[in-house]
Image (cartoon, rainbow, N blue to C red):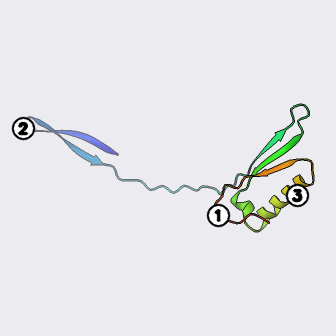
Amino acid sequence: MQLELPTQKSGVIATKTAVAKPEHVTISIPWEVNKRYLEIREISTRKVVTVIEVPSPASKRAGEGCAKYLEKRQKVFGSAIHLIEIDLLRKGNPCQ
């Protein structure tokens, strides 16, 4: 932030620039993973007909996230619901 402070020297107005010192602030940001999906439902019955899934980094990593994703995917495969997976992540292998 700069402030202009006027001064007067022999009839001429000059300006001095005062620079404020930067402040360092540490902010704690909790780790949050949002899982995104879209359900398409039939208008009359509100029954889910299609699920569009966008895998998160957690669902592509081996472990609990991958296991939960595979379980959800298996439920969809065992039903009359269609599944569309859109993987926008450039890193990691699909959860198998």
Residue at 92% across, 47% down = 80
Percent position (x, y) of residue 95? 77, 64
Q: Residues within 10 Å of mark 1 (few under 14, many from 20)?
A: few
Farthest-out residue, left: 10
Farthest-out residue, bottom: 62
Q: Residues within 10 Å of mark 3 (few under 14, many from 20)?
A: few
Task: Provide the residue designation for mark 3.
Answer: 74
Residue at 91% across, 34% down = 45
In this rendering, the answer to whether 57 lies above or below 16 is below
The CA span between labels 3 and 2 is: 85 Å
Looking at marks 1 and 3 on the same chain, the residue that comes earlier in the sequence is marked by 3
Q: Place residue 11 in its image quadrant.
A: top left
The CA span between labels 2 and 1 is: 67 Å
- Label at residue 10: 2
Task: Provide the residue designation for mark 1.
Answer: 91
Q: Mark 3 against mark 2, which lies toward the viewer? A: 3
Looking at marks 3 and 2 on the same chain, the residue that comes earlier in the sequence is marked by 2
- Label at residue 39: none
Q: Is disc 1 placed on a helix, strand or loop?
A: loop
Front-most of residues 65 and 52: 52
Residue at 81% across, 43% down = 39
